[in-house]
Amino acid sequence: MALALEMKGITKYFSSTDVQANDNVNLTVEAGEVLALVGENGAGKTTLMNILYGLIKPDSGEIFINGEKVQIGHPDDAIKNGIGMVHQHFKLVPSFTVAQNIILGMEPNKAGFLSPKEENKVVKELADKFNLPVDPKAQIRDLPVGMQQRVEILKVLLREAKILILDEPTAVLTPQEVKELMDVVRQLAKMGYSVIFITHKLIEVMEVADKVSVMRAGKNVGNKKVSDTNIPDLARMMVGREVLLRVKKDTIQRGKPVFEAKDVSVSDVHGLAAISHVSFNVHEGEIVGLAGVSGNGQTELVEVISGMRPLDGGNLYLNEQDITQANVRDRRNAGVAHIPEDRMEVGLNLQTNLDENLIISRYNQSEFSKFGFLLGKSISRFAETVVKSFSIAAAKPGEDISMLSGGNLQKVVVGRELSGQPSFIIANQPTRGLDVGSIEFVHKTLIEERDRGAGVLLVSVELEEIMALADRILVLFRGQIQGELDAKTATEEEVGILMAGGKLSDLQTNQAKSGKESK
Amino acid sequence: MTGFFSVFTVELLNSGIRLATPVILAALGGALCNKAGVLNLALESMMLMGAFVGIVSAYFVGNSYIGLLIAMASGGLLGLVFAFLYHKYDVDLVILAIAFNLIIQELTVYVMRVMFGNVGSWSDPSINRIPDIEIPLIKDIPVLGNILSGYNIIVYFSWAVTIVMYLVLYKMKFGRHIRAVGENREAAETVGINAVRIQTMALIISGVLSALGGAFLSIGHLKLFTRNMSNGRGWTAVAAALFGANHPIGTALASLFFGLTEAFAVRIQNVTDLPPNLVELLPNFATLIVLIFIALREKLRENNARRRFRAELRAEEQQKAAS
Ligand SMILES: Nc1ncnc2c1ncn2[C@@H]1O[C@H](COP(=O)(O)OP(=O)(O)O)[C@@H](O)[C@H]1O
Ligand SMILES: [Mg+2]
C-alpha cells in the first residue's frame, strides 16, 4: 500500500528573519499510524506543517498523498486532499456553541436561514461516530481547554480529513486531559487515520506514537520506530548534545523562613473565593513546589504575593516584615523576584528592545538613571553581563526581542529577575512551552538560586517538574491547601491524589512507591 | 388637564421618534461593523455626506426619493473607500475615521460655497421634503395610531432595518459568518470565510444607512443643509451601539432614548426659564452619562462582588472569635 503521506526535500528559507526553517526535510506517514514530530522550539516543525496545510509556500520540495503528487497552495487544497490541522492556538469563536463552531462555514441552510436543530444533530452524529462526546449546545467560552481541543478535532473530522496534524496539542492541557487526548489519538489511528503529533515532551512520544521524526535547526536529523529508541536517545538527537532530563540536586540545610502567607483569602471577579484561608511559608535555601491542576487558584495566589492584586483577608510577611499593603515596587526592592506565567503579556514588553526589558524593574535606580534621564552606557553594560551570564543566544543588547524563540525569551525574564540576588523568588510555570534544553537551563538556575540561599516558590501544573525540583510540596485544590508533602518521600500517586481533591488516607498503604523511580 | 397631557406626551414621542431616526440608522450601521470586528468611527462623516448629497441631488433631479437613493449610494461609496484603505493599506482605523470626519466636513462646506455661494446654510424652494405617510388601519388605533403612524418612509425603514438586521445576524448563515469574523477572524478564515469581504460589506452597509440618516436631516425632517448638519449625531450613534451592546434591538432602543432626550430638551425650552444654551446641552449630558455608565459597568460589578466577599470574611472571623 502506498504511503498516506510523503513529503520530499521540503526546503524553506525566511528572508525576513534570515532563517533556514526547513532544509531538505523528508517525512512519511502510513495510514493508521501516529507519527511524532519532535524538536526544540524553532526547529521548524510548525513551518513544515504549515507548508503541508498550504499556509506557507515552500521554496522547493514535493508532497505525495496516497502515492500521488499534489499541489497544495491554500488550506482549501489541503482540506480537499484530506489534510486537517489543529493549530497550536485554537481557532474557535468563544460565544458560539460547540455545534456552531464545528459546523462554521458549512452550515446547512434554507435560503440562508439556519437550522440549529439540524446543526446539533449533525454534530451529535459526528461525535458519536468518533466516540468523542461533546455537548453541542454548550458555549465554547464555558468549556475547559481539553474540551475545546476536542471541538477542534471534530471540526477537522467533519471536513473529512484522513491526515490530522496536531501542533503541540498537549502544551495547554492538564495531565488528565493529556491522557484523554492520547486515547483519542490512538483510537483514530485504529480507525485508519494518520496523525502527526507535534510535541517536545518525549515521554508523550513514547506513549502515543508508532514512529518519530526528529528535527533540529530545520533539518530532519532522525526517523525512528518508537520501539527502537528511548528518551535519552531522542533528547540527544533533538538538542545535539547530552542533556540532563533531571537536573542534579544536592540536599542542603534550609535556613530561616523568608516568606510567610498567613490566612490569605482572595475573591474572584464574581465575589467567590479564589483563595481561602491559605497559610504556608518558604525558607531560605528551599524550593517549595505548589502543585495543582491549573485553575485552582494559582494565578490569584501568585498575583497576591507579587503585589499585582489586593488580598481580601490575611497577611503576607517577607523576612518578618509585613508586606501585605506594600506595592509591587516596594516588594521588589525588599527582595522579591517574580517570573510570571505569561512571558509574552506580563513578563516582557515585546515592542521594545532587550536593554529596556532587562532594566524595566530597576530603571529608576541611581545606577541606571539620573534626574529622570536613562544612562545608556551603564544600561548596555548591564545588559551585556546578563546576556552573557544567562547565555541568551542570538540576542544583542539594543536589539528587538520579538524575534527570539520562546526559550530565549524566558531566559530574558529569568535573567532580569534573578540578577539582583533576590531573597524570595516566585516562579510561576517557569518552563511552560519550553524545549528540553531550555527547561534544563531554567531548572539548573532555580537550583543554583536555592543553593545560594534564596527561598523559591515554584508554581507548576507539571507534576514532573515539581517532583524534580521541590524540597517540599504543597498541593492547591479549589483555592485551599489540600496537603503538604516532604519531597524526599512523596510519590507521584500521593501528589496526584491530592491534586484531584482526595486525601492521603485514600491511598492504600501497601502501594509500592513506584512513581519515584528516576529516569 | 389629562387631555392636554396625553397630547403632550404623544407629541413628545412623535418628535423623539423623528429625532431618533438618523441615530438609529447610523447606530445600526455602527453595530454591524462592530459585530464584524471593524470599528467604524466615521459614521459622522457618512451621515454628513448623506445629508449634503441627499439635498443637492434632490435639487438637481427634482425628486427627493431619488435624492435619498443617491445619498445612500454616496454613503456606500464612502464605506467602500474606507474598507479599501483599511484592508489594502492597513491604515489604522481610528486615524482613518478622523481623516474621513475632517475631510467630509470641510468638503461639504467647500462644495456648498463653490456651487451655491453660501457659507452657513443652503436651501431652495423647489426642493420637496419627503412626505409623511399615514399607515391605513394602524392610524385609526386610539393613541397608538398617533404614535406609530404619520412619519415619512425613512422612519418606517429604520424600524424595518432593525428587525431585518436582527434576523440576519442571529438567524442567517451570512450573519453568523459576520459574527464569527468579528469575534475570531482567524477561526473564520481557516474554515474558508472571506473576512475581508465581510468587513467590506459591513462598512458599505453602515455607509448606506448613515447616509440615509443624514438625508433624513436635510430632506426628511427639514429641507435645508447647514454646515456640519450631522452635529455629532454620528458620535451619538457610536455611543448608542455601545449602549445597546451591538444588538440591533438594543441599539435601536438606545438610539430612541437619545432621540427622546433631544425632543425633551426642545420641549423644555418652551416651558422653563432656563437659559436655552444650557438646555440644549441636555442630550450631550445624557450621552456622557451613558458612556460613563458603560465604562464603569464592569468595574462597579467587580467592586461590589469584592465588597461582599470581604464582609463575609469579616462575619466569619467574628463568629470564630465569639465561639
Ligand atoms: N512567518 C515567518 N517569518 C519569518 N520567520 C519565521 C516565520 N515562521 C517561522 N519563522 C522562523 O523559522 C524558524 C522555525 O520556526 P517554527 O517552524 O515555528 O519552529 P517550531 O514550530 O519547531 O518551534 C524559527 O526560527 C522562526 O523564528
Ligand atoms: Mg511550533
Image (cartoon, rainbow, N blue to C red):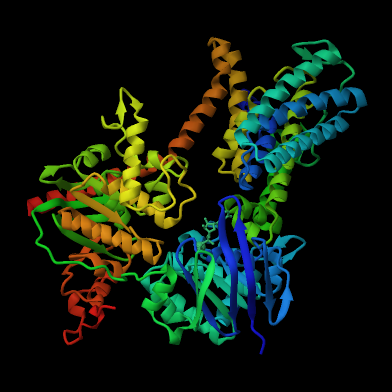
Work out which quarter of the rendered image holds the C terminus of chain B and state it: bottom left
Say above or below: A253 vs A16: below
Q: State the count of labels.
A: 0
Say above or below: A5 vs B275: below
Left or right side of A418 for A85 = right
Image location of residue A268, percent across then percent down: 33, 51
Q: In which quarter of the image is residue A241?
A: bottom left
The residue located at (55%, 66%) in the rendering is A98
Q: In which quarter of the image is residue A442?
A: bottom left
The residue located at (14%, 46%) in the rendering is A317
Left or right side of A234 for B20 = right
The residue located at (73%, 73%) in the rendering is A70
Image location of residue B302, percent across then percent down: 36, 44
Depth check, front residue: A375 or A292: A375
Image location of residue A120, percent across then percent down: 60, 70
Q: Quadrant of residue A86?
A: bottom right
User: Residue A307, can we see it?
Assistant: yes
